[in-house]
Image (spheres, rainbow, N blue to C red):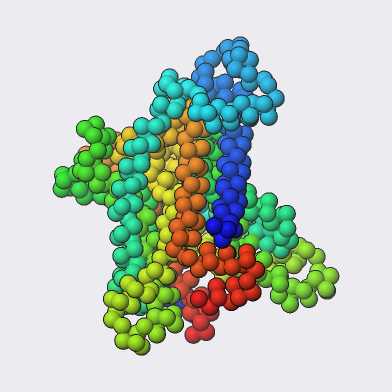
Amino acid sequence: MTNLTPVLSGLGKRLGVMALTMLTVSLLVFLVLEVNVDDVAVKVLGQFSTPDQRHAWLLQNGYFDPLPIRYARWLWGFVTGNWGLSTYYHADVRELILPRLAATGVLMGATLAVTVPVALGLGILAGMRQGSSVDRGVSVLAIITTSIPEFASAVFLSAIFVFGLGWLPGVSTLSGGVTIKELTLPVTVLTLSSAGYIARMTRASMVEAMASPYVRTARLKGASTARIVFAHALRNALGAPVTVIMLQIPWLLSGVIVVEVFFAYPGFGTLLYQASVNSDIYLIEACAMIGVVAVVVSQLISDLINTWLNPRLVRAIQKAALQDPTASVEATAG
Amino acid sequence: MKHFRRPTVLIGGGIVGFWVLVALFAPYLAPFDPLKSLTPLAPPGTPAPGGGTFWLGADLLGRDILSRVIYGARPVVALSTLATLTAYAVGVSAGLLAGYYGRWIDTGLSFLANVILSFPVLVLYIVVIVALGPSPLNVVIAVTFASAPAVFRIVRTIAADLKQRDFIAAAVIQGESAWRILFIEILPNATGPLTVDFCLRLGYTTIVIGALGFLGLGLPPPAPDWGGMVNEGRALAFAFPHLVIFPCLAISSLVLGLSLLADGLNEARDAQSRGS
């Protein structure tokens, strides 16, 4: 398939930029946390270690080597899965993180499974008829829910469902495995904070699609409202929300930290929180790098989905590459 | 000035103005000293020893919650404004340079912005605060670091678009300095989108400063700040919800005010550009 070459080279370029981004991030994390070796020694050995002990430890672990060598060694360790020892837990960082990541994956997966249908549904309903009372209602609801910080909605919901009605547990330690009861509050809090933005984006892009010439044509041809929405408007309206959903992931990851700490959920966020409280430097480094990898990968996925949703883009790239003079005309007119 | 009559702008502006006034006049409004221990865990409405009432109750150490909420408005309003302003100073300058000059300056700055935007915000804050220690100044540094790239992107796009226009070419021919072209000719054209973004970003910053306080990484105690109050009251929240509900209401209302303001200004701008 020679036609796919430009798409593949575009993908290759993206992967290159991705690798460079992560390399720069790793350098930033390393510089911010490890450029001052005395700080590192204090964090690892504790406040009450003597200067002699710190000096010996630094010497033993090669901290007096030049900075580039230390960075290269650190990066190699990270890439090969050797993430060091947690000073607080006295355990291998990698073994600490992996089960926590799985727990956070469950929480984020459940959140997306609730948020995406709710947000898309509300956004489509609101955007179908601009200015209707449904539209206004969804807008107001979205503004209110996105304005309440996660810890505040966690407090409000706990006050009602835990303290007031006693329906749900106030902590989600997953001690008896993953249960719907323990997931309900964390997932609701995260849904409230992230659904509003996606709903508003969906609405805006739906409004635009409904005002476009092909929808007007379909309406003049006498197509039913359902057919107009599902067969014509929706497919074109969904590109922007997909991007937004993927861009929500860094925001969601921030919210996850707060929500996990609030409900004592044994995930990645509580681990990073405890690491920061205890100045557990190697654990923080690993958590930060994992957070960045998650974000960069989600950006790549959003690009791929967008290309897939918009075959016009693929065809335009192919035609442009074949130097077909009609390519740009067709791509814009299509 | 017509858009000041829109209901969302009025309500949003009213809420924000209310909290700014509360922050400014906290010493005159607070009924008690926010740091003084009186009656531990008094429920809302309890009479205080020596006259007065704990309208919102007292916290674990017997400090009046109403006074702490009032004083807590100060660091929240001051820090989020200061932090957003520094983020704007950095983001706007870098965005103008990248958009106007293009080429390697643009490539370099855009790449850096993308790198920083790859951090989940709170992870970035935690890394910066762990490296520098919790203090008001370091919170401002962390926010600047995290918010400037987004401002940069907006300004860069506008500057790159405007530099093609005739009035910029005219300014160049007149021999105006680059500084003048960037800040006097180009920047005023970006004020519309930037005002909306500024209100939204103030809201985000308030949320994140609250979240840092909640995680115990914000301001060192005993100074009252809303996130910190929730953090302190959390352990007892199920028995004494009044410890945490009121600071949560305070921060939610402030952010809601900022969001409404941003939304109203945005609608007004849309209406204006449609020519109605």
Tell me where residue B180 appears, x and y as whole percent. Answer: 76, 66
Q: Nearer the viewer, residue B142 or A249?
A: A249
The residue positioned 71% from the left and 60% from the top of the image is B102
Q: Residue furthest front?
A: A1
Q: Nearer the viewer, residue A278 or B80?
A: A278
Tell me where residue A304 appears, x and y as whole percent. Answer: 48, 55
The residue positioned 41% from the left and 56% from the top of the image is A245
Tell me where residue A25 appears, x and y as whole percent. Answer: 58, 41
Q: Is residue B257 visible?
A: no
The residue positioned 42% from the left and 75% from the top of the image is A209
The residue positioned 41% from the left and 31% from the top of the image is A97
- Residue A116: image quadrant is bottom left
- Residue A29: image quadrant is top right
Judged left or right of residue A297, residue B233 is: left
Q: Nearer the viewer, residue B146 or A71?
A: A71
Q: Is residue A134 visible?
A: yes
Tell me where residue B125 appears, x and y as whole percent. Answer: 51, 42
- Residue A91: image quadrant is top left
Give the number of marks.
0
Judged left or right of residue A213, residue A64 is: right
